[in-house]
Image (spheres, rainbow, N blue to C red):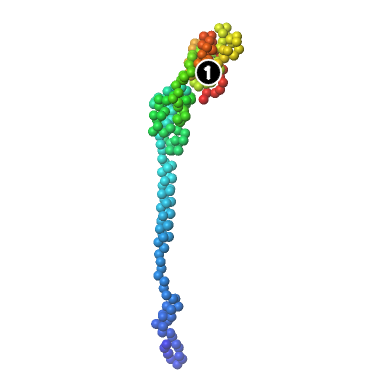
Amino acid sequence: MSRTGIFAVTTPDSATSKNRTREGRGPRVPRQRRWWLLSLSFGLILASVLGVFWIALSAWEREPMLQLSRDVPWGRRIADTDVTTVDLPPEAREFAVPDALRGRVVGQLAAANLRAGQLVALSDVTTQLVPGRGQRVIGVRVLPGRYPARGLVPNDPVEVVGLSSSGVAETVPGEAVFQARVVQSSPPDAEGAVVVDLLIDSAAAEQAHAAAAGGALVTLLGPAR
């Protein structure tokens, strides 16, 4: 303390004031760095960056898949020139054959009428030859007006009615009727008639021979597949 002049004015000593201030604040605790929080934040940022990178990479990832470059009718063997490739995401393997499995498609038979531009699936090919065991292929000449105007395409299921030389159905109902499947059809000749190759069961060979000799009426049973 110090006194000045007539009136006593007390002023605290500077050292004493500093000591009291320090005593009021209490002991100073060292500050700890939260390294685990910093590490966690960095890990989250890194995971987010990697996730975005993986999504972008997956979106741009492509794989060549087999696509038909031309029409292939049912029962015909698929040549290497019949297929090309198109780049698609790997998920397309669910409904298309990758180019790495080309050998499982080329050289096989078309199981249905395959169209140019469609992707090739394993279900589109087969190893079953035409005709198979217990089957025959017979050609029948059909005059205009005795087959659908749309024409006949491979794999069409048809019903064939054998006709007599006079152009009417055979005398015994049902005996001259048989079902078949179209293998191929020729272009119309000068008279507008077409020759249709029919796949039949061997049991229907007699009716088919009669239809080939005397003529036939061909009815479409369902759409081409």
For the point 40% across and 61% down, the residue is: 35
Residue 130 percent location from the top left of the image? 46, 20
For the point 43% across and 45% down, the residue is: 55
Q: Is residue 173 above or below residue 45?
A: above
Q: Is residue 96 above or below residue 188?
A: below
Residue 71 percent location from the top left of the image? 45, 24
Given residues 210 and 151, the one toward you in this image is: 210
Residue 165 percent location from the top left of the image? 55, 7
Task: Return the residue found at the far top.
Answer: 166
Q: Is residue 113 above or below residue 6?
A: above
Given residues 157 and 84, the one toward you in this image is: 157
Given residues 185 and 112, the one toward you in this image is: 112
Numbered label tally: 1
Residue 40 percent location from the top left of the image? 42, 57
Report helix, strand or loop for mark 1.
strand
Image quarter hosting the N terminus = bottom left
Q: Is residue 51 above or below residue 174?
A: below
Asked whether residue 195 is in view, the answer is no
Q: Residues within 10 Å of mark 1 (few under 14, many from 20)?
A: many
| Residue for badge 1 | 180
**Kind of residue indicated by mark 1:** Ala
Task: Return the residue found at the far bottom.
Answer: 6
For the point 39% across and 26% down, the residue is: 80
Asked whether residue 16 is in view, the answer is yes
